[in-house]
């Protein structure tokens, strides 16, 4: 079966003929390469029955600060992009930012860390963290939104996905207060997240059902596939934590963005050293097709 390995270099380390030689040595097959951006991004095509990337090659890529995606050569073109928000599209974990302003940072961050690493169930972690926020004024969330920063390449990524008429969905275990605003700023077509219960401008410490967790993210992906008559191979998904695991596994191309070990182990691509816009190369776009 023809496989496609796409690699993207960081600013500090260009792709060279030595790179191609090393890849061929690791894979032990003949390869054909095609530049997507000279010395920066390329596609490498070869025959293989392997469904996962060679571990030694992943180590080589990390050592040389290359990001990568591995998929069937016939399946690189995508029609649906589905993404996590916190620590993926944006730099912050919104619930941790709320806790920081409310002087609850240490308690909430500890729960977040355990949840993202898969040590405790997401729903349990969410309810515990939101419970700590009881009594906080809604206006505090506006303060946090003003401080939110996008991760490198996020805006360029969404501009080009929309230009290519790829459906875009933001799905988060965070809160609709933020996903709605982020979606509007970046032109995501749909967004899903948890709804905080608010009475008289004050957080009650409760989440209004249904809870958006790992299974919910996967189900949103599956529902969209069915309603738009797509296939799993038409989907590229990206996230960073355990809560994104089911979504990543369900997508034809699942990308770990600076992900936790549990996510990296199940993804068939990673963005660790470059920006989010590297995903545009992963879906087959060449430099001349990408706008800034």
Image (spheres, grey):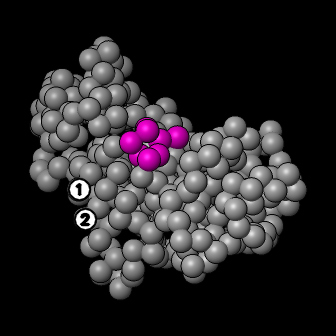
Q: Which residue is mark 2?
A: 219
Q: Look at the image and tell me in which quarter the N terminus lies.
A: bottom right
Q: Look at the image and tell me in which quarter the C terminus lies.
A: bottom right
Do residues under tags 1 and 2 come within 8 Å of each other at their CB atoms? yes
Magenta-drawn segment: 258-265
- In the depicted view, which residue is nearer to us: 197 or 265? 265
Compared to 32, does 25 lie above or below? above
Mark 1 neighbour class, 10 Å CA radius: few under 14, some 14 to 19, many 20 or more? some
Q: Which mark is residue 215?
A: 1
The residues bearing labels 1 and 2 have C-alpha atoms spaced at a distance of 6 Å
**208 displayed left or right of 288:** left
Residue 162: x and y, percent?
56, 70
To which quarter of the image does residue 202 belong? top left
Q: Which mark is residue 99?
A: none
**283 displayed left or right of 246:** right
Residue 181: x and y, percent?
41, 50
């Amino acid at each position: 079966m023809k496989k496609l390995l796409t690699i993207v270099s960081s600013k500090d380390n260009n792709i060279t003929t030595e790179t191609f030689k090393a890849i061929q040595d690791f894979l032990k097959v003949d390869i054909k390469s095609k530049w997507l951006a000279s010395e920066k991004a390329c596609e490498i095509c070869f025959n293989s029955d392997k469904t996962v990337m060679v571990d030694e090659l992943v180590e080589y890529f990390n050592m040389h600060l290359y990001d990568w995606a591995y998929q069937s050569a016939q399946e690189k073109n995508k029609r649906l992009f589905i993404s996590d928000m916190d620590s993926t599209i944006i730099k912050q974990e919104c619930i941790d930012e709320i806790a920081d302003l409310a002087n609850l940072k240490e308690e909430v961050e500890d729960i977040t860390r355990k949840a993202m690493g898969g040590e405790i169930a997401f729903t349990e972690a969410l309810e515990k963290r939101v419970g700590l926020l009881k009594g906080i004024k809604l206006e505090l969330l506006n303060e946090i939104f003003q401080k939110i920063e996008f991760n490198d390449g996020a805006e360029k990524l969404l501009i080009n996905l929309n230009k290519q008429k790829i459906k875009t969905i933001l799905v988060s275990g965070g809160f609709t207060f933020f996903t709605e605003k982020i979606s509007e700023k970046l032109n995501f077509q749909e967004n899903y997240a948890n709804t905080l219960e608010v009475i008289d401008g004050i957080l009650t410490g409760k989440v209004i059902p249904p809870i958006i967790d790992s299974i919910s993210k996967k189900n949103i992906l599956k529902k969209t596939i069915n309603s738009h008559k797509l296939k799993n191979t038409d989907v590229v998904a990206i996230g960073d934590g355990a809560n994104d695991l089911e979504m990543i596994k369900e997508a034809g191309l699942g990308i770990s963005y600076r992900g936790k070990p549990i996510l990296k182990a199940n993804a068939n691509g990673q963005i660790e050293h470059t920006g989010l816009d590297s995903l545009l190369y992963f879906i087959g776009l060449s430099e001349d097709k990408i706008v800034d």
